[in-house]
Every structure is written in structure tokens, then in C-alpha cells.
Amino acid sequence: MVIQPNLRLQPPPHKEMAKKAKTRTIIVKLASTALTGYFKTAIRPRASPAIKAVKFDPVGEFSLAR
């Protein structure tokens, strides 16, 4: 008597899922160039260039934020 393996106990093979779309905007952290540890967050479109802005740093007055 030959015992055959029960094929019904094995799960079906997984299909590849489609990858999720990337968002159009990203959240960036603008850190103070005065190295005070102060930062601001901003939302910018993914396709736009990096943000450089002069922002008020309460620790070191006005400084460039990148």
C-alpha cells in the first residue's frame, strides 16, 4: 500500500501583489544651519527641487534652513 501525500493541505501559491503608488508630496525636515538643533517641517511636491529658506531660529535668530 502506497500512501500518497494529501495535496489539499498545501496553501495555493501566492501571486505577486501590485506595488503601491508613491505619494505626490513628501514631508521634509528643514534643519537650522546654525547647528542649534532647531528644525521645521514642510511639505513639498516630490518632483520639485530641495527647499532652502531663511527661517527664524529662536535659539540663534535668523538662519538658513536646508
Image (spheres, helix red, strand yellow):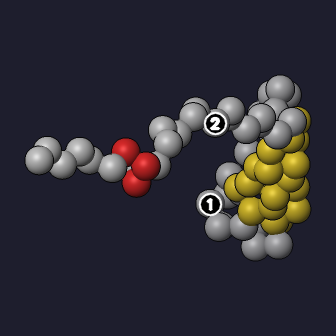
> What residue type is disc 1 on?
Leu
Residue at position x 37%, y 45% in the image: 7
> What residue type is disc 2 on?
Met
66 to 45, vertically: above or below: below
- Image location (x, y in percent) of residue 33: 68, 52
The residue that mark 1 highlights is 35
Does residue 19 appear to the left or right of 5 in the view shown?
right
Question: Mark 1 or mark 2, which is nearer to you?
Answer: 2
Quadrant of image for the C terminus: top right
Residue with the most extreme bottom position: 59
Residue at position x 58%, y 33% in the image: 16
Quadrant in which residue 60 is drawn: bottom right
Along the line of sight, the residue nearer the viewer: 35 or 14 = 14
- Image location (x, y in percent) of residue 15: 57, 34
Q: Earlier in the sequence, mark 1 or mark 2?
A: 2
The residue that mark 2 highlights is 17
Does residue 13 appear to the left or right of 37 in the view shown?
left
Along the line of sight, the residue nearer the viewer: 65 or 46 = 46
Quadrant in which residue 37 is drawn: bottom right
Residue at position x 50%, y 42% in the image: 12
The answer to whether residue 51 is seen in the rendering is no
57 to 6, vertically: above or below: below
Does residue 13 appear to the left or right of 43 in the view shown?
left
Under tag 1, what secondary structure? loop
- Image location (x, y in percent) of residue 50: 77, 34
Q: Tell me whether the residue at label 1 lies in contact with that at label 2, contact meaning CB atoms closer than 8 angstroms.
A: no
Q: Local crowd at mark 1 within 10 Å, few (<14), some, or many (≥20)?
A: few
